[in-house]
Image (cartoon, rainbow, N blue to C red):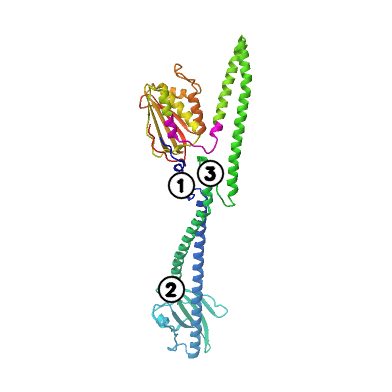
């Protein structure tokens, strides 16, 4: 199989804003906070503008009515007779029936003396309540046509008698203008709010783009594309990038020191244990047997924990990945030479098989042990499959190895994964192969399952984490 070049492994840089409005993101929080504040602010602005407009129209109406009251009072004083039919205002609305614009002159007892043509046939109620210091009063009435009226009344003394001049204007028209203005204002403010919301989306997207680039850079380090975070970042997050790089360097140093110290401790213990074992082996008696037994246990424990430390240190290194297709093809060829009587069938891999996120040697150790074990127990056929799968926990690399051997029961499958357990001592081996596999699987956060194969023997399913930025591979052909 021809391995792809490194350029084919790289994918387009992750878009920092996709999906940038997901729940819990900073951009989503900023957007909804801004949108909520815009809704409150624009609603308050709409009601405030409507109230100001309503006040302005009502004030204008009142001033107009005052003007007509003064004009009617002047005409009345000039005519000298409140019953003069020539008394009239120039505004044609006072001559139009049901216009909502009326004027009436009453005597001191409230009897009708004179009126506008628009009042003919209408029983218009009078205002009640005390007069103000200027001898006038104002209020709101409703005529016979359910039209709301703004009414201003003023008292005039003529020939020793008191007359009341009442002028009414159409308040319903004003309220209609206010409603129209409110609707138009909220349409305009809604459009402004939509534009501001779009602007907040654009601002949040561009303002948070460096965070997305930093996240993508960290992901490239984790997936093995880079060994440290690179790129230029704003002053607000540049210290974070540097701290992450420093953490990576510090982690690598700590791992190296821990590995060296564990190695030194293990090698330092090996010599005294070997001396004790040799001395006990040369002696006789119960004490020598006890010392021999315990030193053997101590030696096995030192070797075990030294191997665990080596595996943990190796798999803790960030930024490693391996081509599973190439490794399995290489292992298959090796096993065919070691077991020439076994037909090993490697199924053609997917065209875009994900890479293993970890050390190549670890994948070889896990897959090699499992494949070798299948060949040892097989009657003649071993099948190997590689595929990518996606679960609720994320993407996985699935390696399936099955044989046509005797297989295992569910109880034996559980037992065989215990350290050093062997179900058949006649087959060569120490029983530690699956122990190493299980140890590495646990370190990488993967899973190992033993099932019944369709070939009649054992089916081993090995699931391992994938390198998300790993490249595409060409179909594998064995």
Q: Nearer the viewer, mark 3 or mark 2?
A: 3
Task: Please state which of residues 310 and 136 is positioned toward the viewer in this rendering.
Answer: 310
State yes or no: residue 177 in magenta: no
Residue 272, given in percent of the width and then of the height, sits at 64, 19
Q: Circle 2 sits on which residue?
A: 173
Around disc 1, counting alpha carbons within 10 Å, would you say few (fewer than 14), some (14 to 19), or many (20 or more)?
few
Between the C-alphas of marks 3 and 1, the distance is 15 Å
Q: Which residue is mark 1?
A: 12
N-term-proximal mark, 3 vs 1: 1
Q: Is 272 on the left or on the right of 426, as rendered?
A: right
Extreme top residue here? 285
Sooner in the amino-acid sequence: mark 3 or mark 2: 2
Given residues 403 and 347, the one toward you in this image is 347
The answer to whether 225 appears left or right of 275 in the picture is left
Q: Is residue 313 magenta?
A: yes
Which residues are the magenta region? 312-330
* CA distance for labels 3 and 2: 66 Å
């Amino acid at each position: 199989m021809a391995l792809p070049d490194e350029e084919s492994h790289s994918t387009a840089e992750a878009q920092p804003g996709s999906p940038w409005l997901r729940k819990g993101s900073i951009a989503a929080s900023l957007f909804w906070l801004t949108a909520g504040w815009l809704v409150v602010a624009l609603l308050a602005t709409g009601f405030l503008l409507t109230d100001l407009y309503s006040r302005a129209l009502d004030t204008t109406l009142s001033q107009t009515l005052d003007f007509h009251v003064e004009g009617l009072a002047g005409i009345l004083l000039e005519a000298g007779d409140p019953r003069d039919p020539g008394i009239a205002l120039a505004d044609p609305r006072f001559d139009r029936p049901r216009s909502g614009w009326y004027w009436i002159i009453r005597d001191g007892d409230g009897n009708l003396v004179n009126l506008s043509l628009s009042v003919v046939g209408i029983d218009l109620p009078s205002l009640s309540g005390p007069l103000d210091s200027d001898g006038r009063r104002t209020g709101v009435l409703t005529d016979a046509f359910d039209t709301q009226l703004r009414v201003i009344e003023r008292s005039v003394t003529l020939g020793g008698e008191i007359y009341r001049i009442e002028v009414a204007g159409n308040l319903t028209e004003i309220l209609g203008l206010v409603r129209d203005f409110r609707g138009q204002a909220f349409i305009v403010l809604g459009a402004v709010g939509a534009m501001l919301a779009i602007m907040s989306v654009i601002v949040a997207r561009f303002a948070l783009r460096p965070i997305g680039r930093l996240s993508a850079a960290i992901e490239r380090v984790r997936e093995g594309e880079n060994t440290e975070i690179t790129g230029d970042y704003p002053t607000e997050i540049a210290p974070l990038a540097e701290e992450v790089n420093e953490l990576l360097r510090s982690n690598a140093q700590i791992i190296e020191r821990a590995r060296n110290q564990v190695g030194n401790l293990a090698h330092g213990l090996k010599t005294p244990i070997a001396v004790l074992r040799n001395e006990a082996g040369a002696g006789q008696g119960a004490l020598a047997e006890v010392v021999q037994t315990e030193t053997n246990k101590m030696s096995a424990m030192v070797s075990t924990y030294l191997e665990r430390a080596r595996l943990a240190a190796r798999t803790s290194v960030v930024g490693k990945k391996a081509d599973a297709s190439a490794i399995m093809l290489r292992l298959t060829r090796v096993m065919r030479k070691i077991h020439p009587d076994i037909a090993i069938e490697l199924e053609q891999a997917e065209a875009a098989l994900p890479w293993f996120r970890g050390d190549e040697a670890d994948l070889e150790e896990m897959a090699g042990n499992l494949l070798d074990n299948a060949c040892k127990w097989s009657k003649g056929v071993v099948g190997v499959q590689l595929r990518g799968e996606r679960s609720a926990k994320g993407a996985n690399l699935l390696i399936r190895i099955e044989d046509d051997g005797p297989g295992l029961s569910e109880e034996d499958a559980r037992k065989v994964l215990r350290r050093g357990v062997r179900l058949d001592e006649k087959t060569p081996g120490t029983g530690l192969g699956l122990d190493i596999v299980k140890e590495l699987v646990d370190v990488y956060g993967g899973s190992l399952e033993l099932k019944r194969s369709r070939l009649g023997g054992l089916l081993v399913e090995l699931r391992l984490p994938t390198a998300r930025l790993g490249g595409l591979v060409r179909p594998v052909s064995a």
